[in-house]
């Protein structure tokens, strides 16, 4: 299988190093100083799995240079593993790389990515994925795979599931515990509800996830969920009820108690966060239904105000 991975961050590194163990042709699209380092030194992970992959295992392209013509319409599957803010830019790269009968999979936090992919390459070639594998980059560039999880993939309601089934089988064979989901919007919203309830509160407080298990902060997380769940139901999304969500939230916070969420890491590094695709995206949807979500709106505004 010919696979291109665009935006090779922490999760992208877990994906790529796992795929490199099998006999797939892999192309990586990167940018900046970090991308240049990967192209020269390869990729290395530690933790759940320890592995180093030499750079000549992959072919490469760079944001800063023209795309190689020999990779036009080359890929069976293009997986975008970037931050939400980079998805739109990378969909243009994906359109160049993808075969006519290929599949683009966006693996990024937040709402709107399936719709963006469908607009870029067509519903029949659009899919999204979420993952609970945990990873973060260490000083020096190595990635630490901090916790094994799953990959869940879903295609556009107008798409062809058989294309995604092939990718899911490949990911499962390399140990990433992949599954194909029928309810793609429910899958996306389930992850979004966790992220918007946890990430901005942990980020604003400078807290590891486990600190949110305290009664006052946990209650605030649940209130954020209650606001957003109203919107999901108006959008006819099947989301967890309050009791089920509370159990899921506690489970996630316990399992990731020592982790710093990605939004906190972004604030510390002075990077743009994904709040516009999480809390702010839900606020915007609520406005279409004549609803106000004051807590989500406040969290989104405060996170935006923290940017340099």
Image (tube, rainbow, N blue to C red):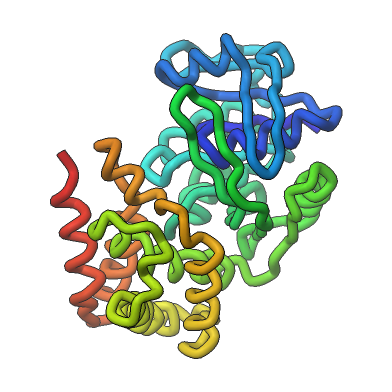
Count of numbered marks: 0
**Which of these two is toward me, 97 or 137?**
137
* x and y percentages locating residue 272 in the rendered image: 28, 42
Residue in the picture at 36% in, 66% down: 211
Q: 70 left or right of 93?
A: right
Q: Is residue 161 visible?
A: yes
Q: Quadrant of residue 79?
A: top right
Residue in the picture at 67% in, 26% down: 73
* x and y percentages locating residue 193 in the rendered image: 44, 70
Quarter containing the C terminus? top left
* x and y percentages locating residue 181 in the rendered image: 69, 66
Q: Quadrant of residue 129?
A: bottom right
* x and y percentages locating residue 300 in the rendered image: 23, 61
Quarter containing the N terminus? top right
**Which of these two is toward me, 15 or 80?**
15
Q: Quadrant of residue 121?
A: top right
Residue in the picture at 53% in, 82% down: 247
Residue in the picture at 59% in, 57% down: 132
> Is 158 placed above or below 67 here?
below
């Amino acid at each position: 299988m010919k696979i291109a991975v665009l935006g090779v961050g922490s999760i992208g590194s877990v994906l790529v190093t796992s795929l490199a163990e099998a006999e797939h042709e892999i192309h990586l699209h990167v940018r900046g100083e970090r991308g240049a380092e990967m192209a020269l030194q390869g990729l290395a992970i530690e933790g759940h799995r320890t592995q180093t992959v030499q750079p000549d295992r992959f072919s490469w392209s760079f944001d800063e240079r023209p795309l190689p013509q020999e990779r036009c319409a080359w890929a069976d599957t293009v997986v975008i593993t970037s931050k939400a803010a980079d998805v739109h830019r990378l969909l243009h790269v994906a359109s160049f790389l993808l075969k006519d009968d290929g599949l683009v999979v966006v693996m990024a936090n937040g709402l709107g990515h399936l719709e963006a992919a469908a607009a870029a390459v067509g519903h029949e070639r659009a899919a999204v994925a979420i993952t609970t594998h945990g990873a973060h980059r260490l000083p020096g560039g190595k990635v630490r795979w901090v916790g094994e999880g799953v990959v869940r993939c879903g295609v556009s309601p107008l798409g062809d599931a058989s294309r995604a089934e092939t990718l899911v089988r490949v990911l499962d064979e390399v140990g990433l515990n992949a599954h194909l989901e029928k309810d793609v919007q429910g899958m996306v919203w389930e992850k979004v509800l966790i992220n918007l309830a946890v990430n901005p509160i942990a980020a604003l407080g400078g807290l590891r996830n486990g600190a949110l298990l305290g009664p006052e902060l946990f209650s605030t997380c649940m209130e954020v969920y209650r606001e957003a769940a109203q919107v999901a139901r108006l959008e006819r999304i099947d989301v967890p009820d309050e009791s089920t969500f509370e159990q899921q939230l506690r489970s996630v916070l316990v399992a990731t108690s020592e982790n710093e969420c990605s939004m906190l890491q972004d604030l510390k590094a002075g990077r743009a966060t994904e709040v516009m695709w999480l809390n702010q995206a839900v606020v915007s949807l609520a406005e279409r239904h004549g609803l106000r979500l004051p807590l989500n709106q406040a969290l989104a505004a405060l996170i935006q105000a923290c940017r340099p």
